[in-house]
Amino acid sequence: MRMGEGRQEHRITGGQDRPPVISEVVDYSRAGVLLENELRELAEGGITEETMSRDWQPAQEQKFSPESEALYDELEALITEEWQQFTEALVEDPVLRRYLQMKYKVEGRDLDVLMSAIQRQSEPYQDETEAFQELDSIRKRLGIEAGLRTFDALRCFKDQIRTLYFFDTIREKIEKGDRVLEAGAGTGILAIAAARTGAEEVEAIEINPVTAVFARRVIARCEERGIIESGKVKIRLGDAAEYKPKKGEPSFDALISENLYTGQFHELQVQLNDYLLQFVDTSQDKIIPRAMVNGVELMDLLSELPPPKRFEVAQKTAVVVKDLGIDPRAPKGISDPKAYDVLQFTERQAVGMRNRIVKTIAKDGVIDSVVIFSLIQMSNRKGNFLRRNESEFLGNDLAIMLQNPLAVKKGDRIEISISYRAGDRPGQAQIRVKRFLPGGIPAEEVGNIWEQDALPRAA
Ligand SMILES: C[S@@+](CC[C@H](N)C(=O)[O-])C[C@H]1O[C@@H](n2cnc3c(N)ncnc32)[C@H](O)[C@@H]1O
């Protein structure tokens, strides 16, 4: 347990139409030694300041097992084919129709509109047209946009590097006869990998009914083709935060959960893990992924952009660096990257975070953004972690724009304070940058983030 003191029991809420609620924020500024200890432990697994930099080993040099690569190829063909049939047939799907009728008490034209709204989930985000918005509002009203859109669950699978890390870790950790619990089945691929490795039973929970229908079809197809044995994987429709095992059931041997986002903004990984760990025998160390390190770097991001884009980005509260069309490894930070938080998914964690760290400026420049990034430790096997910007979605550099850029000189000492609560979007994080006056304390606050806090907070 990282921070025992002050921990309160909190009920997990989230998913469906309820926003996630945070009931506790721990001040890690008092936990410097703790953070150091955790980092030392992670360094044994290969996570060091070096791997937090932008010059990590390029993705194409990563080696995955031939078995994982073969499973990926096989599933890619199967899922692509199934996806096409699924999206065509979805609007008529009798199981889904019945489910919606019963659960949301909709009939007739409303049901037709809802079915086509749901079908839109299987398409990429595209239009902001009136028709789309109308359908979207029905879907939201009924609370069925819980979790990810089905199309995004498919994109997770297509994030090949990420998926292969999971496949290899599942091969390493899951043993014959294991009972596995999964939070967020998506397309069902991690459950399939677990069954393929020998799991006796995989209970995979998915909150989005459309995704659950799709995952069940994928599982059925895998069973038909002999990729997995029949009956080993069960896709359960529901909120993992409300999961209750049957009375007298033994503990699960392993927990798989991929609800990750840089710094854990607006994702429920921590809450879901906190809740589900009570049903898992944690002594076996089969929690996948195992931990996540959040790091921070001060940047002069705007100077990397051409003028029109520069002005546009300067108005934003937060941007994914990759989306700016610049190589996330190209910009030069004006301070070295540094860890500010470690999340151990093997233990209950504080929800939300608050921390202060001090950094020395490496070169003269203007700080216009604070970049947050995450490294995800899959298991304690050395080197088995997702590096910065390595996956399509996980742990990517996220720039939080400062309202008042701050000119700094090499050798200046800067304090960064970061706090956010579970469910916050990146732009809602509270970030302050202070420069110490010559001679140290007291610190002079010279830059801060957008104060308007335009979006309502989750709690
Ligand atoms: C990032 S995807 C990962 C899917 C799959 N495990 C994979 O790795 O490809 C997370 C999935 O979890 C689902 N999800 C989110 N919150 C959930 C909850 N509270 N209970 C069950 N499923 C949830 C989402 O709908 C989404 O399909």
Image (cartoon, helix red, strand yellow):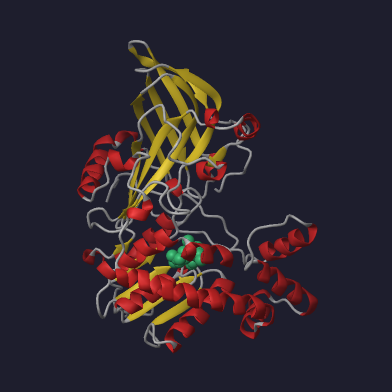
Q: Nearer the viewer, residue 428 or 54?
A: 54
Quick check: 259 left or right of 98?
left
Q: Residue at x 58, y 36 (%)?
A: 317
Tell me if residue 145 comes above or below residue 59 in the rendering: below
- Residue lying farthest front? 60
Query: Residue 98 is drawn in which quadrant?
Result: bottom right
Q: Residue at x 41, y 33 (%)?
A: 297
Q: Position of residue 446 (x, y in %)?
A: 49, 19
> Looking at the image, how many numbered discs can be counted on the residues?
0
For residue 59, say whether it is visible.
yes
- Residue lying farthest top? 438
Q: Position of residue 267 (x, y in %)?
A: 48, 54
Q: Position of residue 124 (x, y in %)?
A: 63, 61
Quick check: 447 left or right of 144?
left
For residue 204, say whether it is visible.
no
Q: Residue at x 44, y 55 (%)?
A: 260
Query: Residue 9 is drawn in which quadrant?
Result: bottom left
Tell me if residue 147 comes above or below residue 327 in the rendering: below
Q: Position of residue 237 (x, y in %)?
A: 51, 75
